Amino acid sequence: MDALRGYGELGLGSRLKRVSEFIMKETQLVYDYFNIDFDPYLFPIFKIIVNKNGVTNKDIQNSLHFTQPAITQAVNKLNDKGLIRFKHDDLDKRKKIIHLSNHGKRTLMKLEPIWKSIEDVIKEFTLENSSSLIEHLNILENKLGSKSFSETIIKNVKIYGLQELNIVLYQEEYVRYFYELNIEWLKTYFYVEAYDEEVLSKPKQYIIDKGGHIFFAKLNNEIVGTVALMPLGDDGLFELTKMAVSPKHRGYKIGQKLMQYCIDFAKNMRLPKLILYSNTKLENAIYIYKKYGFIEIPVEPNSPYARSNIKMKLVF
């Protein structure tokens, strides 16, 4: 039994401290994995130095509201690691201005994809809705206990920091991936409807030949995801549809990259809007659609998908 959870709101401070220490420890494992000599506790002060073209200890204190001894200790550690350099102020020689050193700039280039991955994983782990901070902490700690925080970050960095993901256009050689990826996704979350089977089996007939577009996410010469812009009628309306990602590559924002590509592509085509059909049980997907600007509209009685109970549109 977790005693801290039993304390409810009285244990909030201790719970936050425990989560913080756990995340710091896991983040250190990530830095160590990539052989980066950096301490996660130095992040806030290092980031202030990165963001400003010259900063003093007082500037850092005003920005972060840390104690002066804590700032001095962190600055000394950054200096010991060779990540910063000092320059005397032109007007007041007693004042030292802190800048990144050349080594600090090189280290920053290694850290940035890791920070992006950490940010994405934190968003993923804290995406659930809750009615209180304590309930949200329970959800977060459950996820931290069931899925390795550090390993998830490392996998993300490998995909988005050290490897190249390309979005490529429809080619006949990719047709089987369009079918297989979508069929797998449908069987995992729902079931394959007759309309799905028809469109997925004949994408050229139903999408390409009608002026639509199919895109594929390609990672190291492997097709790992797909999505389509399918025309509906003759009035320029397109459906964002048939998005699927390989099971072993889910959780790395590939679907979001495909969706962003479709949105940018639609804007370049000067389309007035996009629509999509989904199901409210896909809470994460609905959240992401809304984040990208989609709003809910009524589902027509003769919707092409029996499983769909929500329709959304994005107006440009």
Image (cartoon, grey):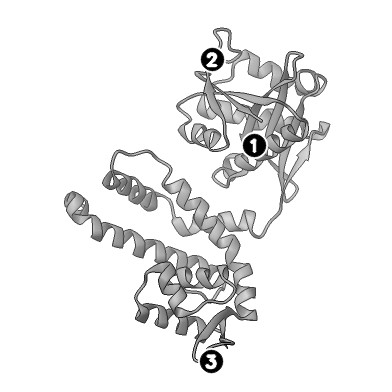
Query: Which residue position holds label 1?
Result: 259
What residue type is disc 2 on? Val
Residue 244 seen in the figure: yes
- Residue 252 appears at what percent x and percent y? 57, 47
Neighbour class for label 3 at 10 Å: few (<14), some, many (≥20)? few
Instruction: Tell me, yes or no, whether the two marked residues, 3 and 1, touch with CB atoms within 8 Å.
Output: no
What residue type is disc 3 on? Lys
Name which residue lies at 50% across and 18% down: 309
SS for tag 3? loop
Name which residue lies at 53% across and 92% down: 93
Q: Nearer the viewer, mark 3 or mark 2?
A: 3
> What is the spatial separation of the Cα atoms under label 2 and label 1, in whole angstroms?
21 Å
Q: Residue furthest front?
A: 91
Neighbour class for label 2 at 10 Å: few (<14), some, many (≥20)? few
Name which residue lies at 41% across and 70% down: 62
Q: Quadrant of residue 136?
A: top left
301 or 68, nearer to the observer: 68
Q: Earlier in the sequence, mark 3 or mark 2?
A: 3
Query: Which residue position holds label 2?
Result: 299
Q: Is residue 206 above or below residue 168?
A: above
SS for tag 1? helix
Identify the disc placed on residue 93: 3
Instruction: Tell me, yes or no, whether the two marked residues, 3 and 2, touch with CB atoms within 8 Å.
Output: no
Q: Earlier in the sequence, mark 2 or mark 1?
A: 1
- Residue 264 appears at what percent x and percent y? 71, 38
